[in-house]
Amino acid sequence: MKATQALMDEHRVIERIILVLETAAQNLEQGQPVRPGLFIEVTDFIKGFADGCHHQKEEGILFKSLEENGMPVQGSPIGVMLFEHEQSRQFTRDLREAAQRLEVGDKAMTSKVIENAVGYAALLRQHIMKEDQILFPIADQMIPQEKHEQIWDDFENFEHEETGEGVHEKYLALADRLTQEVSL
Ligand SMILES: [Fe+2]
């Protein structure tokens, strides 16, 4: 199986959290009560799963393999993806800070929470679409067939060494819980 399939599967999980974020931001905008801690937990998920695990696999393993097989970093799809990962980190930092201040009663932070939640969601939705529809099909072509298995192994090793046992499952459970919370 192509190595990009593992990353596409993770995209489907990240999209569930994007939907949580969009729904929570919309509820907040409409004046409905939303627990600020929910946004903080979303940033826990982003930091641990979307950025900590998923983006690290892309940057440290898949993009490296693309480079080795002839794709430049500068002025290429890799360069755009790296830039967008950096933008997503900035949104996450700003969202977390605003949500923490909202949690201790700084109501003026409401608009900052909404702005960064919506900004992150929009960025990641189009980012995932570009990877799924443009970059990954290119990777499937550029990376030789026999290398795909090695990339799968590298992903597995990364999970064991960097992410740790059971961490993936912990974030899946968090995604389930937050989805339930915004659906009530
Ligand atoms: Fe991705």
Image (tube, grey):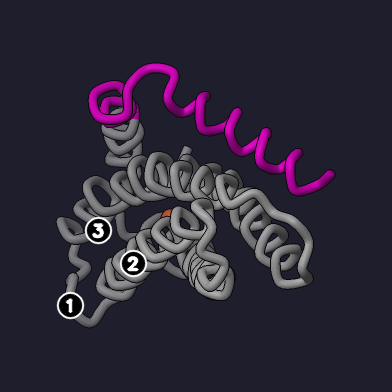
Q: Viewer-nearest of labels 2 and 3?
A: 2
Q: Where are the magenta residues, as a range?
A: 156-184
Q: Earlier in the sequence, mark 2 or mark 3?
A: 3
* Between 59 and 44, the one nearer to me in the picture: 44
- Residue 127: tell me if it is visible: yes
Considering the numbered disc 1 on the image, is that residue within a helix, a strand or a loop?
loop
Q: Viewer-nearest of labels 1 and 3?
A: 1
- Residue that appears at 32% across and 29% down: 163
115 vs 16, left or right, is: left
Residue 116 on image: x %, y %? 49, 70
Q: Which residue is mark 3?
A: 66
At label 3, the amino acid type is: Leu
**Label ID, residue 90:** 2
Q: Is residue 18 magenta?
A: no
Q: Which residue is mark 1?
A: 74
Task: State the residue lying farthest toward the top.
Answer: 165
Query: Image quadrant for the C terminus?
Result: top right
170 vs 87, left or right, is: right
* Between 81 and 17, the one nearer to me in the picture: 17
Q: Quadrant of residue 19?
A: bottom right
Q: Viewer-nearest of labels 2 and 1?
A: 2
